[in-house]
Amino acid sequence: MNPLFSRKKILICLLLLFTSFYYSNAQNIKPPATIKKPTSTSGGSVTNKPSEDAKNAAQFAEKYKNDAQQYAQSAEKYKMDVQSDAMYVDKLKSDVQGDARAVDMAKNDAMQDAVAAEKAKINAQQDATEVDRELFNVKNLQNEAERYLQQIKSQAAELDALLTKYKNATTDTDGDGVNDEEDKCINEKGPASNFGCPVISEEIIKRVNLAAKNVFFATASDKLLAKSFPKLNDVVTILNENPSYKVQIDGHTDAQGKDEYNQDLSDRRAASVKAYLAGKGIAETRLSSTGYGETKPVADNNTAAGRAKNRRVEMTLSNY
């Protein structure tokens, strides 16, 4: 319990008790009776003795005087206590005001810190934006540099090609009169009509053409018949004897059936011949095959004889 309020309550109760007691007893105080002149009934001397009421009244008055003095002292003490409590309250008030000022200062500091933090945040965002712009510029510069590098490489390649062309324009390694730039066989002599490569003899061309005319397949199939093998083996011999030779194999069909089917059949038949030659040891880099379906007829597809001529394989030699 707060001692300030305890003392106040006690003093207030004492004052109320004193006041009540005083006024309740004051009503019972009677003034002393009129003092009559003493008389003697016996003819003797007269004695001046105060009445009992006067004595009682004096004693009561003295008692209440003492009580009043005590209550006055208590009141003075209460006054001093109240003043002390007031000083204590003033001190508490001063402390509270000081705390309030401290809180206000802390609040102001916090607000200033918040403002500073917000400024720092804005600055950081601005810095981040600036970094993004710089990064974007750097990427653009990198792209520009990459394009410039590609241009330099392209120009360097063109320069190399021009330099090579210039050198070849005046160089004829095999001395056949065809400059190396146009000569497809720079180490073998040949006419310009054959791109500087040796001309394949008519005899060899006839042997290859004969072999092509003797290539046979099962009906509606790409399976080679055994009677095709002797002439194909002769082509293998020619290729082995002439390592620079290459052969182009073309497949053809007649116009019977759908275009798509004929195209597929011609592709497979030409590939079958190529596979046979490769199986005999000829490098596939020297062999190529193409199917033309019914697009290149050499005879009338309306006759059986014409259709038979159109179903064919052609082989073309080259040495470049």
Image (cartoon, grey):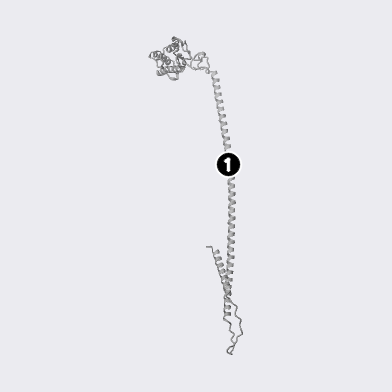
Which of 295/28 is in front?
28
- Residue in the picture at 58% in, 41% down: 125
- The image shows residue 129 at horizontal and vertical percentages of 58, 39
> Which residue type does callout 1 highlight?
Gln
Q: Residue at x 57, y 37 (%)?
A: 132
Identified at 54% across, 20% down, the residue is: 165
- The residue beneath circle 1 is 125
Q: Is residue 4 left or right of residue 313?
A: right
Q: Nearer the viewer, residue 274 or 57?
A: 57
Q: Residue furthest front?
A: 41
The residue shown at (58%, 52%) is 107
Residue 79 location (% of width, % of height):
59, 67
Would residue 132 be visible to someone looking at this image?
Answer: yes
SS type, badge 1: helix
> Is residue 246 visible in the rendered structure shown here?
no
Between residues 294 and 193, which one lies in front from this camera angle? Answer: 294
Q: Position of residue 191 (x, y in %)?
A: 51, 13
Residue 46 sits in quarter: bottom right
Instruction: Give the farthest residue toward the bottom.
Output: 43
Side (left or right) of 99 relative to 238 = right
- Say above or below: 154 vs 249: below
Q: Is residue 307 above or below residue 110?
A: above
Which residue is outermost to the left? Answer: 226
Check the image and report above or below for 44 versus 150. below
